[in-house]
Image (cartoon, rainbow, N blue to C red):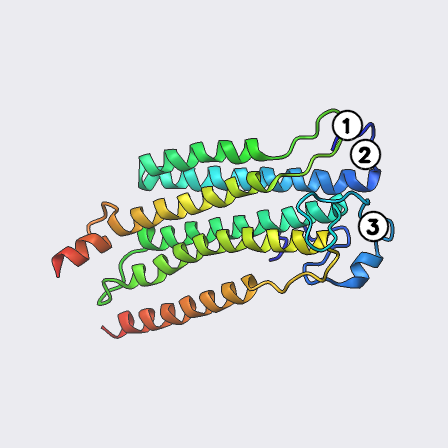
Amino acid sequence: MTSAGDGHESGYDRHGDEASRAAAPDARPPERSVPDAGPAETEPDARFTMANERTFLAWSRTALALVAAGLGIVQLLPPFPGVPVGRHLLGIPLIILGAVIAVAAYLDMTRNQRALRRDQPLPRSVLPRLLAATIGGVATVAAIVVLLSATR
Amino acid sequence: MPSASPHPQVVDPANRTRLAWTRTAIAFAAIGGAMLKLSPVAGLVVLVLSLPIWAAAPRSRGTGVATSSPRRLLVVTGTVVIVALAALAVATFGHSPDSLGQLLRAR
């Protein structure tokens, strides 16, 4: 899901795969220093920056899909018999997760870009685990709600 | 970073990035269109918000390849958060007979 719809990225991996950098040997950053220094920073190759940007956009679309799914569950599903707040239990966490993912994706993107500028390994992203955990939780709640409504 | 002729290896990633921006803007418009049915005002707001997303896409001037500034990406994040808040409001206080607001008031 890291780069949905961009399956054929040009040799850039979020987790700092050195092999992927080796695949683009002429992708060394031009020696153009960034004003707000710190450790020596150079502007990364444009392809890496664009891949980072596409990953961010893919996460934003995922966030948007979660918001749409949450809203659809709350507004379009028929109520669960015997569990009046069932749809809200399922839908509202998805909407909140959408907002959280949108913000986290931006922070992730800026961290990755900083690491690229400093020629450091990319930091590990918390987003996949967050997404998996929340979807797993919502699926569990969905199973419980469906079972409860079936028994009433 | 305009240049006379961008390196061919950069043109494809730039095109993919522009397409990703277009997909994102279309996703916003689609959500807005769907929300129109549930809440015309919120749907219209989201539909209109797809315009700044589309406008935030980097455009290469001349033959150069453009990349986005963090501020443009912040526009996307802010817009998704606004959409999520609007969706939360519609989900909680929307005018369905068994909305969460109605359920909470009934107790």
Q: Which subunit holds the residue at mark 1?
A: B
Q: Amino acid at mark 3?
A: Arg
Q: Determine which quarter of the picture holds residue B38.
A: top left
Location of mark 1 (residue): B63
**Mark 3 = which residue?**
A28
Is residue B23 left or right of A135 when viewed as pictured? Answer: right
Circle 3 chain: A
Query: Disc number at residue B6?
Result: 2
Residue sitting at x 60%, y 35% = B57
Residue at image position (83%, 37%) is B7
Say which amino acid is labelled 2: Pro
The spot of residue A107 in percent (x, y) is 55, 54
Left or right: where A86 falls relative to A142: left
Q: Are marks 3 and 2 in contact (CB under 8 Å)?
A: no
Of B5 and A35, nearer the camera is A35
Q: From this view, report whether residue B54 is shown above or below residue A48.
A: above
Q: Quadrant of the N terminus of chain B?
A: top right
Q: Name the quadrant containing residue A118.
A: bottom right
Which one is earlier in the sequence, the residue at label 2 or at label 1?
Answer: 2
